[in-house]
Amino acid sequence: KFVPDRLNTQSMILVRVDPAAKQATMLSIPRDLWVQIPNQGWGKISWAYQEAGPQGAIAAVESNFKVHVDDYVWIGLDGLVKLIDKLGGVNLQVTNPVMDDYYPADLNGTTDPYAYYRVAVLPGATHMDGVHALQYVRSRHGDSRGDFARSERQQQLLLAIKAAASHMNVADLPSVASAFNGEVKTSIGLDKMRALMSIANDFSGPNVHRVVLVPPYTSEGWAGGQSVVYPDWSQIRPLVQKTFA
């Protein structure tokens, strides 16, 4: 639907890894968060990447959340599907069903970029391939908690991917990277990637703090004729300083 390398952000997650304490934090940033974007003015934070790429997204996060970002990882929708299939799928415990009559059909080869179809993910323990995992974390209709529930599912999937990739090592990276055909991009160098992979198995569920900016950290409203999420920085920034300082 969009110009290559200026894609609409589906998800934005700020991650901190503390190797010494063997702890990590994931903070999901609502893509509709209404913020001041450097060199762009006011808008949804998802626009930052669309207009200025990775550095624009980093600048928007740093200036609003008052935190330094060392690196970024970007993965396209096709890339996520390929990654999960490359890992042999992921195991997930679905606690809430996903029923969506308006799931985008943009990856189905349709000539209509705004076509939709129905998806359903039933509750319970399940093994998902890439397509079904993407449906699980991309769907945003049929859930009364909307994008907040989707953010929780996205964090859940990241942990499932980490578990499925526990057998991988640095030697596997070239073959994995070649399979993505540009659908995964990162500023993380090989040495840092090697260091992160060496400690990845130290981070289990209890050692990963998961944060979603639900009310009262945020509130829903309207700006510029569209639905947006307003931040309460008086509550968000102390939380960020506590967990990301």
Image: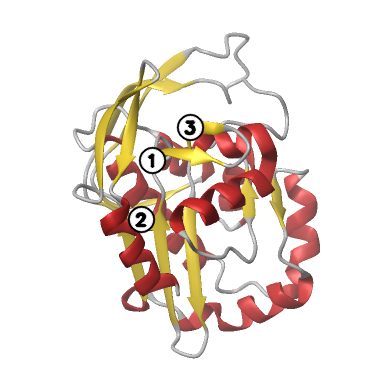
**Three-letter amino acid code at the position of disc 2:** Leu
Local crowd size for mark 2, using a 10 Å CA cut-off: few (<14), some (14–19), many (≥20):
some
Quadrant housing residue 24: bottom left
Q: Earlier in the sequence, mark 1 or mark 3?
A: 3
Q: Specify which label sits upstream in the sequence, 2 or 3.
A: 3
Q: Of the residues shown, which amino acid type is indicated by label 3?
A: Trp
Image coordinates of residue 239 in percent, x first then y, are 32, 65
The alpha-carbon separation of the residues under discs 1 and 2 comes to 10 Å
Depth order, front residue of 32/37: 37
Front of the two marks 1 and 3: 3
Q: Position of residue 164 (x, y in %)?
A: 51, 65
Q: Which residue is mark 3?
A: 42
Contact (Cβ within 8 Å) of mark 2 with mark 3: no
Measuring 62% from the left and 33% from the top, which residue is drawn there?
50
**What residue would you read off at disc 1?**
136
Task: Tell me if I can see residue 85 in this picture.
Answer: no
> Badges 1 and 2: C-beta atoms under 8 Å apart?
yes
Residue drawn at the location 53% of the way across and 44% of the way down? 130
Distance Cα–Cα, label 2 vs label 3: 37 Å
Task: Answer above or below: position of 110 versus 91.
Answer: above
CA gap between label 1 and label 3 equals: 31 Å
Report which residue position mark 2 lands on: 92
Q: Nearer the viewer, mark 2 or mark 3?
A: 3
Name the quadrant containing residue 73: bottom right
In the rendered view, tell whether residue 45 sits above or below residue 227.
Answer: below
User: In this view of the protein, can residue 105 be seen by the observer?
Assistant: yes
Q: Amino acid at mark 1?
A: Tyr
Label 1 with label 3: CB-CB less than 8 Å: no
Of helix, strand and loop, which one carries label 1? Answer: helix
Residue sitting farthest toward the top: 112
Q: What is the quadrant of residue 71 in the picture?
A: bottom right
